[in-house]
Image (spheres, rainbow, N blue to C red):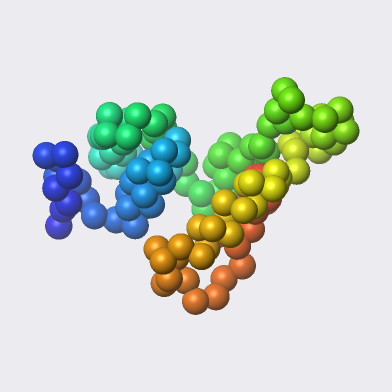
Amino acid sequence: MGSHQNGASLPVCIGAAIVRNFANKGCNVIINYATESSDNSAATLAQELEQAYSVRALALRADIFRQSARDSLISLVAVRDDDSEEAKELGEKFGGRAAYAEEIAGLIATICNSEFGWCTGSIITANGGLSFSI
């Protein structure tokens, strides 16, 4: 089973569809996978996304079922240079900053998108990397 995009035959999987969707919208992506056998296909996918969408794509092998691997993936969103002094102080204290209104608005817009129609009830977290759940 494969998908023929840009002349390449790649496995069809939800993860690849997700990163293609984000890259198509101009987002940089991390392609997380768990096994050595996926090294080549993940690298190929990253290259495809960078060429097709002019984004950064990082293929990263990390088994998210192990706490140490999850910890290596998670980092809180950095404070911006133009943040207020209060935001910078809180960011330094807690290791990251609070969300900006446009970031929460983007999440809400995504949930309201027709592509989100298969989700019938979930808890969606927007926490900048403060917590990670599976």
Q: Residue at x 29, y 56 (%)?
A: 13
**Quadrant containing the N terminus in the rendered view:** bottom left
Please tell me which residue lies in front, 46 or 73: 46
Q: Is residue 41 left or right of residue 58?
A: left
| Residue 98 pos. (x, y %) | 75, 43
Q: Position of residue 8 (x, y in %)?
A: 14, 40
Instruction: Name the residue located 75 percent from the left edge and 38 percent from the top edge.
Output: 97
Outermost residue, top side:
81
**Residue 101 visible in this rendered orientation of the protein:** yes
| Camera-side residue of 1 and 80 | 80
Q: Nearer the viewer, residue 115 or 91?
A: 115
- The spot of residue 10 in percent (x, y) is 19, 46
Please state which of residues 134 and 68 is positioned toward the viewer in this rendering: 134
State the image coordinates of residue 5 (x, y, percent, origin top left): 17, 44
Q: Which corner quadrant of the image does residue 35 belong to?
A: top left
Count of labels in the image:
0
Residue drawn at point x = 74 percent, y = 25 percent? 82
The reply to whether residue 68 is visible in this rendering is: no
Give the residue drawn at x 64%, y 46%: 102
Taking the image as shown, residue 7 lies to the left or right of residue 13, namely left
- Horizontal side of 8 relative to 128 (left or right) equals left
Q: Quadrant of the C terminus?
A: bottom right
Most distant residue in the left direction: 7
